[in-house]
Image: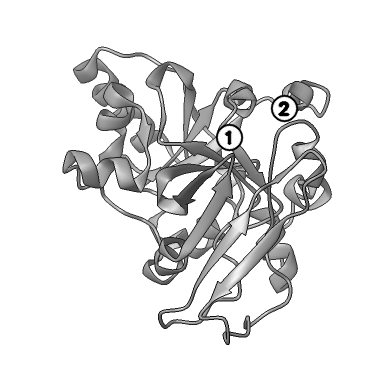
């Protein structure tokens, strides 16, 4: 997926609570499953309902069946509906930038929207999705077989050469907050990195105000890792 250079992708984005930054600088960004395996309890800013949807979504790729929680979700835009949803926590949220070289990793998967948007209900239904590679068409199987998806506008998954062509760049790069359900889904297009993003691939930290910047500078001194920290009010503006 090295075509990201031609598309002008200079960074990917990860939203987290400030209480997680020290651990991330030491160990990298860990998937939810890896955190569970290691007994790590990060401060979560995730919507529980969305996490329930992700827990019931499985990707079939190159002979492997993996739950979404085995991937680290990165965004192509810092201004996602998730950030708007948590506007009351903006003084606690840190946006990390990640080197887009992770897009070239063979297990990385990209989406054309929010990975959790699969039309699942709040019950026990679940879905298996074949990742589109080369000429392979994305296919999905819902369980139980009698289940009917709650929406037709669902997110698809791609990997390998040409995968980035499926990212809705017009919506990802839009400056206004998305208004329709489809726009909200597309704005949250993801790059899913299997298991972990090592700390050396984290390139910077971005916050809403100067107080949080000072806090992060102290955190970096404590873990002996220095990265650029910038106040980016425009990313958080409503």
Q: Position of residue 177 (x, y in %)?
A: 69, 60
Q: CA distance from mark 1 to mark 2?
A: 9 Å
Query: Where's residue 172, x and y in %?
Result: 73, 48
| Residue 159 percent across, percent down from the top left | 68, 38
Classify 10 Å Cα crowding around label 2: few (below 14), some (14-19), many (20 and above). many
Q: Are marks 1 and 2 in contact (CB under 8 Å)?
A: yes
Comes first in the chain, label 1 or label 2: 2
Residue 154 visible to the viewer = yes
Q: Which mark is residue 1?
A: 2
> Badge 1: how crowded within 10 Å, few (<14), some, or many (20+)?
some
**SS class, disc 1:** loop
Q: Is residue 103 above or below residue 42?
A: above
For the C terminus, the image quarter is bottom right
Return the x and y of residue 5 as percentages of the image width and height: 77, 21
**Residue named by callout 1:** 108
- Above/below status of 174 relative to 23: below
- In the rendered image, the residue lying farthest to the left is 39
The residue sitting at 28% across, 39% down in the picture is 20
Instruction: Identify the residue at horizontal 71%, vertical 52% (top origin).
Output: 112
**Quadrant housing the N terminus:** top right
């Amino acid at each position: 997926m090295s075509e990201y250079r031609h598309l002008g992708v200079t960074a990917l984005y990860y939203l987290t609570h400030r209480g997680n930054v020290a651990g991330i600088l030491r160990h990298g960004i860990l998937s939810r499953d890896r955190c569970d395996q290691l007994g790590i309890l990060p401060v979560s800013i995730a919507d529980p309902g969305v996490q329930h949807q992700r827990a019931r979504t499985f990707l079939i790729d190159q002979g492997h069946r993996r739950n979404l929680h085995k991937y680290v979700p990165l965004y192509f835009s810092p201004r996602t509906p998730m950030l708007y949803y948590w506007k009351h926590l903006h003084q606690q949220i840190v946006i990390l930038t990640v080197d887009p070289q992770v897009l070239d990793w063979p297990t990385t998967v990209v989406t054309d929207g929010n990975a959790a948007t699969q039309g699942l209900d709040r019950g026990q239904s679940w879905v298996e999705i074949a990742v589109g590679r080369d000429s392979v068409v994305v296919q999905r199987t819902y369980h139980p077989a009698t289940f009917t998806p709650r929406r037709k506008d669902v997110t698809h998954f791609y990997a390998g050469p040409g995968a980035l062509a499926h990212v809705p760049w017009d919506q990802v790069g839009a400056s206004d907050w998305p208004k329709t359900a489809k726009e909200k889904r597309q704005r949250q297009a993801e790059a899913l990195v299997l298991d972990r993003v090592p700390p050396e691939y984290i390139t910077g930290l971005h916050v809403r105000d100067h107080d949080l910047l000072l806090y992060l500078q102290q955190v970096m001194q404590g873990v002996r890792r220095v990265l650029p920290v910038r106040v980016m009010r425009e990313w958080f503006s409503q």
